[in-house]
Image (cartoon, grey):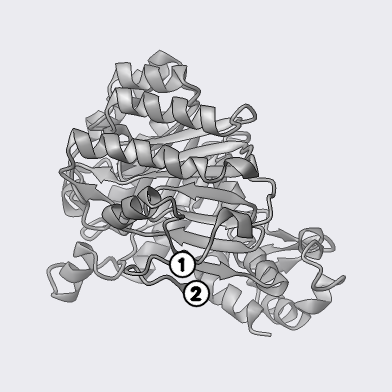
Amino acid sequence: MVRLDLMSPTVLLTPDQVTPTTVQGLYVHIPFCFHKCHYCDFYSITRQSRERMDTFVELLLTEASFWQHHRPRPRTVFFGGGTPSLLPLDLMQKLIDGLKKLLDLSGVIEWTVEVNPATSDREYLAMLLGHGVNRLSLGAQSFDPRELQMLERHHHPRDVEQSLRSAIDVGFERLNLDLIYAIPGQTLGSWKRSLEQAISLQTGHLSCYGLTYEPNTPMAVRRRIGEFQPVDESVELQMLRSTRDMLCAHGLPAYEISNYARPGDECLHNLIYWKADNYLGLGPSAASHLEGHRFKNRPHLREWEQGVMNQQLPVIEHERLTPEQRMNERVWLGLRLQEGVRFEDLIRYHVTSDPYDYYRSGLQKLSESGLIEVSNTGFCLTERGIPIADSVVAELLAR
């Protein structure tokens, strides 16, 4: 791993060092939020002026221009944050139009924008749809006001339904809701009620994540000082299993450990990540992977701005993966998918002509333990293996 001293003017990576390749996905990180939720570990900042947002859009387009000679032609675009919908309407228009001029987005088949239920309105949503956005992801998190308060979410459950109704009215057909389980104070019953409410809204996609206590987040600090008791692991496991059963019964089977969709409504952008394909990230803290080059932008708005203004890639970390590392990464990411990993997808890394033999010891041991199912074409986690996926992967890759 090569790290860049934030005080150094030296750039350790330039676009010329990366061989032009097919870029399947474009990720744009918009870091602005009106409030920092206590569980959130994504880079975001609050209380930013209109002037700062204007500068941000200008510099984001400048960063995109650095990659023009690569001629990226992504199939998916994802605006994440932060709260992308906090960007003023005219600046969001300017950003979208600018990206279309700089990059070839003519082949995009899925364009997602994350939306906070408390910051979206019909005019804004109509603008997004009119400019090519065809998928929205709303951060519902819970339909219990007390649980939202625990997470420091500043919307009401009814805001979610209102936002969805507005999105459908203006013409959006592909919609996702994010939900969180194992929230302190949450019971299996209250989680099921949130799931039932989400199901009743009939979106084609649901993302259901177990709450994680990321280091240095307010939630982690509050847990450490004993402000609350986390949900017992056995209850969290029940929540996961009930989620898989309930959503499958309502036509939303799991296609990834935390993601559920009607067939055909899977998030194509996130599938790029899980299949270890190529994606380009723009904006502070955004990560990229281009044919083994994995790098991350500076997770600080001012430092990111300074890098771009100096006509430099604002990179803080850069790693060149070996073919073996890339194949192993394809395994641990791909195992998150319900379909698992296909042997033929591993051959393209030119590490081995027989991936089964390469991982034979781990596959046999895990198969005998009932944690992995192996077939002639590949392998996947079993229902027993899904709750301990990280441990299963560690065992498999410990050759």
Residue drawn at (65%, 73%) of the image: 325
Badge 2 marks a residue whose secondary structure is: strand
Relative height, residue 344 to residue 261 (above, below): below
At label 1, the amino acid type is Glu
Whether residue 156 appears in this view of the structure is no
Residue 379: x and y in percent read 73, 64
Q: Which residue is mark 1?
A: 317
Q: On the image, which quarter does residue 354 sit in?
A: bottom right
At label 2, the amino acid type is Val
Relative height, residue 182 to residue 311 (above, below): below
Residue drawn at (47%, 57%) of the image: 241
Residue 71: x and y in percent read 64, 39
Residue 139: x and y in percent read 33, 41
Q: CA distance from mark 1 to mark 2?
A: 6 Å
Residue drawn at (29%, 52%) of the image: 301
Work out whether residue 378 or residue 275 is closer to the camera in this orientation and state it. 275
Q: On the image, which quarter does residue 169 sit in?
A: top left
Q: Which residue is mark 2?
A: 2
Dot 2 surroundings within 10 Å: few (below 14), some, or many (20 or more)? few
* Residues at discs 1 and 2 in contact (Cβ within 8 Å): yes
Residue 93 is left or right of residue 344, and the answer is left
Relative height, residue 342 to residue 224 (above, below): above
Dot 1 surroundings within 10 Å: few (below 14), some, or many (20 or more)? some
Residue 297: x and y in percent read 42, 57
Residue drawn at (57%, 37%) of the image: 76
